[in-house]
Image (spheres, grey):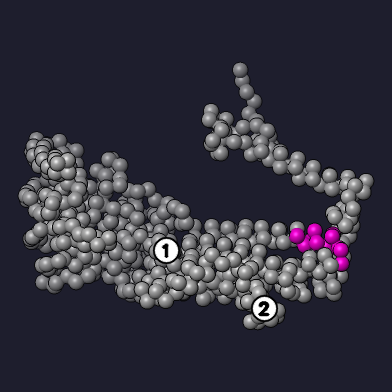
Amino acid sequence: MSERPPSGLAVWLGLADNPFTRQKTVRFGDPSALRSGRVWSIIVVVGLLAGWWLASVFQWIEPFYWPPLGATRDRLVKLATEGFRNIPLWQHVWISVFRVLMGVLLGALAGIPLGFAMGLSAVARGIFDPIVEFMRPVPPLALIPLIILWFGIDETAKISLLFLASLFIMTIAARSGVASVAVAKVHAAYSLGTSKRQVLTHVILPNALPEIFTGLRISMGVCWSTVVAAELVAADRGLGSMIMIAKNFLQTDTVVIGIALIGVIGYSIELLMRWAERKLVPWKGR
Amino acid sequence: MVYALPDAGSVHALERVSLAIAAGEIVAVLGPSGCGKTTLLNILAGFLRPTRGTVTVGGRVVDGPGADRGMVFQQGALFEWLTVAGNVGFGPRMAGRPAAEIRATVAGLLDTVGLAGFADTPVYRLSGGMQQRVALARCLANDPAVVLMDEPLGALDALTREKMQGLVLKLWQETGKTIVTITHSVEEALYLGERLIVMAPRPGRIEREFRLPFAREGLGVDARTVKASPDFVRVREEVLGMIWGMEEQIMGEAGS
């Protein structure tokens, strides 16, 4: 019996085995032996869109609960050209992204040196350990009331909140990066005549980079969730505030568009960070 | 040397170890696990301070690690964020040597250890054997007086290991360095020890010392010939017998 090799398309869709999965007999329990299953993903996405379209055409759902397809498209065009409440859509997006970037940047600038100090000095560890360990399990959202009491609801307040959200993540990441250095590497460096300062900059720092990067990625994710939530509570610009205000005007279509944008941007940030990680710390996990 | 453990216990790791190593000697230290051979090497390297006694290298008392004693570790001590050339040139670069001089040193050493053409390869892409070649070259680039090796070939497969033993002998001949190797392989110890120190456990001490011709023979003929010679086999069996005796004694004590 001669078998025709499956076409590339069939393999991509997951309708046929590729040469690697074909040879495997054990499939249940070995995820690498599974087909791509992409055909199902396509069916689901197309099905959801078709359902939305049918529901719009036949007016199955009240626009109050879920907006019709055409109206949503019109709203998106309107948001992109005229903006929401006289503020262009891109500004709502940018202000949210900007807050996240500032929060993560400031958190990293303070957290990385703090984490290094805690990993390298008994005094620093003793001083900051209770604070860091106490703040670690506190969700950043729980700080919002305090931040509002301290800073009001202006820009400082939002960036301070994101700074705090990122600070403890970055501190812990940097500290564990320092702790992860194999003592053989440090010994090897000293045996090569390296000074303490050189061990810090040429061994401990590069060795901690993968952990620091993981910290940055987690920070980005947490800060993105936090900024949206913070904008829901108190802001007049930003994606979170846009959907909250749109709700007050019963603009379900704007709410849906805002939620979709929040998802797309969060996912893009994650992809961008993974890409940067592969480029900047290619030895990670080797 | 009483080695204090992090959990506040302690082990009598070494008892009155006295050892004089001449410049240019190649010495192998062999013993069953727990005989304190790694402790001994860590004291020589300056990573541990002995409870009593001193280590002197060329008249200077050792107090901490230094560039005069190069280390080759079993594995995991290369800097994986650097290329092969970056690793080999690390010592001279930290010492602030001129770039041209470092380049020449690195190129020469990579040639010697058989890694010419791999200068720009990241070290995490190399096989275990090639990584240990980098570790040897990195150590030699610093031109230390003594090379200390802690199970340098322990993680390699048998074939690669034998090739690397030949490389160590070749480097010994070409550089004239004093080399001290810790190993748990009897064959390797016989081959890489002009002087073979056999250590016994509990407390760790020097049990016996051999002066062996095999390292010098290995410079001329290939490793298999040396290791198959009747002399080699006879000494190997004798040393194996000693080690087995110690192991059984440990087991007996543990069982009683």
Mark 1 falls on what kind of element?
Answer: helix
- Nearer to the camera, A38 or B15: B15
Q: Which residue is mark 2?
A: A148
Percent coordinates x, y for residue B150 in the rendering: 23, 55
- Mark 1: amino acid: Asn
**Residue in the picture at 14% in, 41% down:** B256
Q: Nearer the viewer, residue B216 or A194?
A: A194
- The chain identifier of the residue carrying mark 2 reads A
Location of residue A164 (image quadrant): bottom right
What count of labels does the image hold?
2
Q: Secondary structure at mark 2?
A: helix
Q: In the visual, does B48 lie left or right of B249?
A: right
Which x, y percent locates residue B201?
13, 50
Q: Identify whether A282 is placed above or below A168.
A: above
Checking the image for residue A234, the label placed there is none
Instruction: Return the chain for callout 1.
Output: A
Q: Amino acid at mark 2?
A: Ile
Instruction: Name the residue located 84 percent from the left edge and 59 percent from the top edge.
Output: A253
User: Residue at point 32% right, 65% down?
Assistant: A186
Q: Which residue is mark 1?
A: A207
Span highlighted in magenta in the image: A249-259
| Residue A9 placement (x, y as % from top left) | 69, 37
Q: Nearer the viewer, residue B225 or A103?
A: A103
Image position of A231 (left or right of B62): right
- In the displayed structure, does residue B131 sit left or right of residue B39? right
Q: Nearer the viewer, residue B235 or A90?
A: A90
The quadrant of the picture occupied by the N terminus of chain A is top right
The question of residue B166 being in magenta is answered with: no
Is residue B219 among what the camera can see? no
